[in-house]
Image (cartoon, helix red, strand yellow):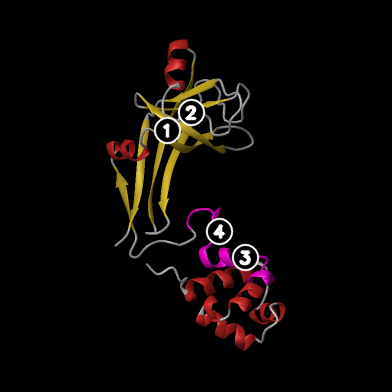
């Protein structure tokens, strides 16, 4: 397996970071203590051509050599762009439930003022419903019976494809002690945010739809 970074990919990351900082290629060369022509040569050849020069480029960009070679480990999804010949396909309800699995991370959209709020929560799937837990006065706590939207999605960075599932329906509080105990024992029920989150919210979708981005 070849672990040598692709010079073209590294050069693209350098160009993107340079533009974020408002630097011209000449200004970057000056800050990295090299001639613009030499900078272009290094970008074409890749980091192994002059490791020391590459370190100076990273420092001038307020970055690290590792980040420029491999990308940010904490970058938002979608940095790599779509795959070849992308197509967007609809999903059946059965396919939607299969993709969301038994638990994971989703986003709850709440109808509040001055505008809708979308928040990440970890969920469990139970008896054809999404359920999640929050605090008694948490920002993810909807009004009883409120119409909400719940979304789960996934992006494959390597292949440039992914899917998204959207569920619409009312949100209801779970109050039965036996039901609360059962939900708390399901895989994925522990709140990622930690703390005391005793309130369980259940969303029984009246409509669930999904789309899948496929590539050649």
Query: Which SS class for mark 3?
Result: loop
148 displayed left or right of 1? right
The residue at which mark 2 appears reads as 147
Give neighbour class at mark 1: few <14, some 14-19, many 20+ (Cα, 10 Å): some
Between the residue at mark 3 and the residue at mark 1, the CA separation in whole angstroms equals: 43 Å
Segment colored magenta: 58-78
Image: 34 above or below 184: below
Q: Residue at x 33, y 39 (%)?
A: 96
Image: 94 above or below 80: above
Q: Nearer the viewer, mark 3 or mark 2?
A: 3
The residue at which mark 1 appears reads as 168
The residue at which mark 4 appears reads as 72
In the rendered image, which quarter is residue 72 located in? bottom right
Q: Residue at x 44, y 31 (%)?
A: 188
- In this view of the protein, which residue sits in the foreground, 92 or 133? 133
Between the residue at mark 3 and the residue at mark 2, the CA separation in whole angstroms equals: 46 Å
Residue 69 appears anywhere in the view: yes
Between the residue at mark 4 and the residue at mark 1, the CA separation in whole angstroms equals: 34 Å
Residue 77 x, y percent position in the rendering: 49, 53
The residue at which mark 3 appears reads as 64
Q: Earlier in the sequence, mark 4 or mark 1?
A: 4
């Amino acid at each position: 397996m070849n672990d040598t970074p692709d010079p073209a990919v590294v050069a693209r990351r350098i160009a993107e970071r340079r533009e974020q900082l408002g630097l011209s290629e000449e200004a970057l060369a000056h800050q990295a203590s090299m001639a613009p022509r030499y900078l272009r040569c290094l970008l074409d050849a890749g980091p192994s051509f002059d490791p020391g020069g590459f370190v100076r480029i990273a420092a001038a960009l307020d970055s690290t050599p590792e980040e420029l070679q491999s990308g940010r480990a904490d970058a938002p999804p979608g940095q790599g762009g779509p795959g070849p010949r992308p197509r967007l396909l609809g999903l059946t309800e059965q396919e939607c439930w299969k993709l969301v699995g038994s638990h994971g991370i989703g986003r709850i959209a709440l109808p509040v003022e001055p505008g809708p709020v979308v928040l990440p929560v970890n969920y469990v799937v139970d008896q054809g419903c999404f359920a999640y837990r929050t605090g008694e006065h948490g920002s993810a706590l909807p009004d009883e019976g409120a119409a909400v939207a719940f979304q789960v999605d996934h992006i494959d960075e390597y292949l440039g494809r992914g899917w998204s599932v959207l569920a619409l329906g009312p949100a209801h509080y779970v109050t039965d002690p036996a039901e609360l105990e059962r939900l708390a024992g399901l895989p994925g029920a522990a709140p990622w945010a930690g703390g005391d989150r005793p309130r369980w919210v259940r969303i029984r979708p009246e409509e669930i739809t999904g789309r899948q981005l496929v590539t050649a």
